[in-house]
Amino acid sequence: MSYFINVILPIPLDKEFTYCINKSEAIFLKPGMRVAVQFGKSKVYAALVTTVHQNAPLIYEAKEIEHILDETPIVTQYQLKLWSWISNYYLCTKGEVMRAALPGAFLLESETIILKNDKVEFDESLLKDDEFLIYEALQYQSLLRIQEIMNIIGKKNVLPVIKRLIEKKVITVQEEIYEQYKPKIVRYIRLNSEYTKEDSLRTLLDTMTRAPKQREVLMHLFTLQAKATKPIKVSELVEVSKSSSSIIRTLIDKNVLEEYHLQTDRVQFSGDIKGYTKQLNEYQDNALQEIKDSFKDKSVCLFHGVTSSGKTEVYVKLIEEAILENKQVLYLLPEIALTTQLISRLQEYFGEKLTVYHSKYSVNERVEAWNNVKEGKAKAQVIIGARSAIFLPFVDLGLIIVDEEHENTFKQYDPAPRYHARDSAIVLANMFSARVVLGSATPALETYYNAQQGKYGYVKLTRRYGNVLMPDINLVDIKTKYRKKEMTGHFSDTLLAGIHEALREGEQVILFQNRRGYSPVIECNTCGHSPQCPNCDVSLTFHNYKNQLRCHYCGYHMAMPQKCMACESVDLTTKGFGTEQIEKELKELFPDHRIGRMDQDTTRGKHGYEKIINSFEQGDIDIMVGTQMLSKGLDFRNVSLVGIMNADNLLNFPDFRAHERSFQLMQQVAGRAGRTKKRGKVLIQTFNPFHQILQQVSINDYTGMYKDQIEERHQYKYPPFYKLIKITGKHKDYNKVNEATNWLGRSFRNVFKENVLGPEFPPISRIRNQYHKNLIIKIPQGQSLGKTKEVIKKIHSSFKSIKEFSGVRVVINVDNY
Ligand code: ADP
Ligand code: ZN
Ligand code: ZN
C-alpha cells in the first residue's frame, strides 16, 4: 500500500502537488499541517497538506516528503474551504491565497531570510546543537538565507530546526513586502515576589523607616496595584509618587522591586476599561431590534445609517451579545491606520477581549493572534482588522461587521488574490452560519441592490445621534466667481467668509482636495512642454516643499528644473492644484491660525496618522487640509465647516463607478461637519453646480442617486446586472502587449461575442516601465459563472503556450473595483 498527500505550495501553481509518505505518516498527518518538501531541483518549501490519500499521481512520480513540521494543523478545515472558494472565484492559485493568508513565520521556503530576534531573552543552554549553530552564526551575521543554514548545519532538511527556533522566539523571518513594525518595549515595575506575603512585607516596611522617600514609593505602588488590573509602568510610578527614577533604581538594586519589560502594541490601550457600553437612544435601539429581526430569516443585513447616527454603538451591542454566547466576532475596517479613534473606543468596552490584527505587526505578534483565534481564546474573541483578517483561523464565528462596507480598499488590487473582503466575509460567515452586518452611510450600489432584491435585510437610521441636523450643504459656482473676480487663489469669497466665521466662533475647519502635492502639471509657456515621468505615462507633480517633481505612480523624483527641459525657456507655469498649494495659500490668508495637512506625504512614518489626528482632535490645528483620508469615519467634535475645494475632478474620472464614488466621498467628507451640537455647514466649490450628482449630494439624496445610477448600470450593462472580469496584459514592449492582448481579445470574442470590451490602453498606459492594455469580459445574469471561468482559464493556458507572447504578464481581476 502506498500513501500520498496533496499539498499547496506557496507559489502560483495551478494544481495541488502530490508527495508520497509512509503508513505511520499517513496516520499522523492531517489536513492543515505543514510538511517540508523539495520542489524542483533545489527549492524547499513548507507546504500545506490538504488531503491524505492513496492515489498515485498519473503523470509524475511522487517524491517523498522531507519532514513533518507541525504536530497539529495550523490551518482549519474552514480556512481550506475559504481558500478554495477564493481561488475559484477570483481565478488565482491556492498558493497565492496561502501567501496572503498565512503570517510570514509560517511561510518557510528557500528564499526566506532569517534574522535574530533581539526582543526576547532566553536561555542559550536550552538550545539543541543544531539550533545553537544557527543562533551562533546570527551573532556574527545580521541575516541568513536557508541555503547558508543548510551549509552551517550540514544537512538539507533544515525547515524543522528553523520552525523550532521561530517558536522559541530565537529567530524571526524577514518580510520584505511590509515596513518592519518594531514593537515598543515598555518598562514595568512590581514588588519582588519575596515580599508579596503579608508578614515579609511588614518587616520590609519596618526596615525602611529611615528611608522615607523609598517607603513612600512603595506605598504608592501598593495603591496603584490595588486599583489597577494591568501592569504598572515605571514612568507611572515615578509620576504618582513624585519621586525620581534614581530612587526606583535603588529599590531595584536592593531587590525590593523588580523591573520587567513587555512589548506593547502599536495601538496600545492606555485608558481605563469601562466594561460597560453606552445606552442607545430610541432610534438606535429600534435599529438594533430591526437588525436582530432581520437575522431571523436573512444572514446578511445592510445597516444604512447616516453619518454620525451612532452606528458603532449599535455594532457594539451586537458584539456584546455575541460575546455572551461565546462566539467569535470579526470587525472589518477599510484601513487600520486611520482608525485609532475607533479602536480605543472599542478597547474601552471590550478590553483584553479585543485583538487588533494588522499586517504591520511583527511576525511573532501575528502568529500569536493567529494561535489565540485558533484556540478560541477569550483574549481574541473580538478581532478588529483590515481585509486580511478574514484569513484568521476562526473556530466559532458568530458575527462579522463590515464597517464602511462601500469602501473600495476592501478589494485587493495587487498582488493576487484579488479578493473583495466584504464579499469573502459573507462566504466565510456562511460556513459558520454567522451573521453579517454591512454598515454604511453611503452603501455600495451592489449592496443596496442586494437589499432591494430581498437578498439582504435592510435597516435604516436617518437621525444623527443627539438629533443634530444633517449638515447644510451649499454649492458654490466658481465659474461665476472667477468671472466676477471674487476668488482669492483657489478660495471663493463664500468659502473664505465661512472659514472666518468658523474660526471666530473657535470652531475647526476641514478642507478637502483630492490631489496631493503642490500642482499636478508644470507647463512651459513658450513651447508647451510639461515634464513627464520617464517610467510612467503621466506628468510629474510639483511638490513645493521639497522643490521636487514627483511621480505618484512609481515614486520617481527629480529636482524642480529651473528651465524648460525642451526649449530652455524660464517661463514655466503650474496648472491645477493639490493639498500643498492649498496649505500655502491658507498660511498666507490666515497667518494667525494653525494649518495642518493630512495626505500621503504628511502621514508617513510610524505614527504619522495618529499624530495628525490627535493634534487636530486636541485643537492644536484650526484648519486641516487633506485628501480622501479625511473621509474615513473620523469623529471630530468641533468641526463646523467642511469645504470641498473642487468637486469637478472627482466627477470627471473615467470609470463607470466615478459618479457613485464622488457621491460617497463627498457625503462622507461632509459627514465630518457638525457632529455634536450645532448644525454643520458644507461648501462645495464647482464649475458645474447643476451636475446631477452634486445636486443629490447637496440634499443628501442617496435614493435619488441610486435610482439614476442603477438605471445607467442597467442600460450600459454594468454591475450588479453584469459581472465584470478585467484582464490586463503587461509588458515593457508596447508591441508585444498590443499583439498579445489582441490575440486574447479575438479568442474571448469567439466565445463571449459582444460581451468583450477592448483591448484598450487605459488613460495611463505605462506604469513603472510596463505597458498595460485591458480587456473587459461582461457576464450577463444567467450565464454560468463557473463555465465562463473555465473558458477564461483554458484560453489563458493556451496563451501561455504561445512562444512569441512569453514574458507578457496576464493579470485577471474578477469584480474589478
Ligand atoms: P457613525 O459611525 O454612524 O458615523 P458614531 O458611532 O461615530 O456614528 O457616533 C457619532 C458620535 O455620537 C460618537 O461620538 C459617539 O460617541 C456618539 N454616540 C453615538 N451613540 C451614542 C449613545 N448611545 N450614547 C452616547 N453617545 C453616542
Ligand atoms: Zn519649453
Ligand atoms: Zn512614474
Image (spheres, grey):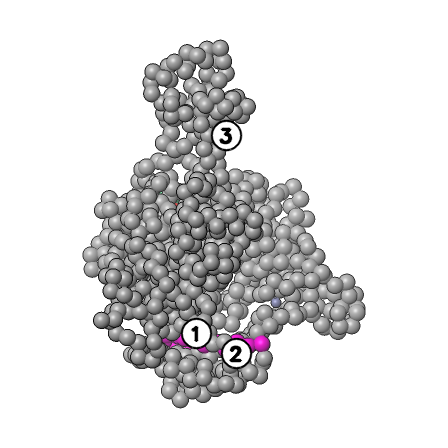
Q: How far apart are marks 1 and 2 (CA)?
A: 16 Å
The amino acid at mark 1 is Ile
Quadrant of the snapshot with the N terminus: bottom left
Q: Could you tell me residue 231's position as x and y percent?
A: 41, 32
Q: Which mark is residue 235?
A: 3
Q: Residues within 10 Å of mark 1 (few under 14, many from 20)?
A: many
Among the 4 quarters of the image, the one containing residue 424: bottom left
**SS class, disc 2:** loop
Label 3 vs 2, first from the N-terminus: 3
**Circle 2 crowding by C-alpha within 10 Å: few under 14, some 14–19, many from 20:** some
Instruction: Determine whether label 3 and label 1 are within 8 Å by CB.
Output: no
Residue found at x 40% / y 72%: 13
Task: Check if residue 730 falls in the magenta segment.
Answer: yes
Is residue 131 positioned above or below 219 on the image?
below
Provide the residue span drawn in magenta: 715-732
Please indicate, yes or no, whether residue 494 appears anywhere in the rendered image. Answer: no
Q: Which of marks 1 and 2 is nearer the N terminus?
A: 2
- Left or right of 193 on screen, residue 690: right
Question: Residue drawn at (36%, 17%), measured in percent from left and top?
Answer: 200
Disc assigned to residue 807 = 2
Q: How many labels does the image show?
A: 3
* Residue picked out by circle 1: 812
Residue projecting furthest to the left: 296
- Mark 3 and mark 2 residues within 8 Å of each other at the beta carbon: no
Task: Depth check: give the residue in front, 798 or 670.
Answer: 798
Q: Position of residue 128 (x, y in %)?
A: 41, 47
Q: Find the distance from the CA under tag 3 to the CA under tag 2.
A: 58 Å
Who's the residue at 44% across and 27% down the image? 258
Q: Residue at x 51, y 83 (%)?
A: 805
Q: Position of residue 710 (x, y in %)?
A: 38, 71
Percent coordinates x, y for residue 235 in the rendering: 50, 30
Quick one: quadrant of the C terminus?
Answer: bottom left
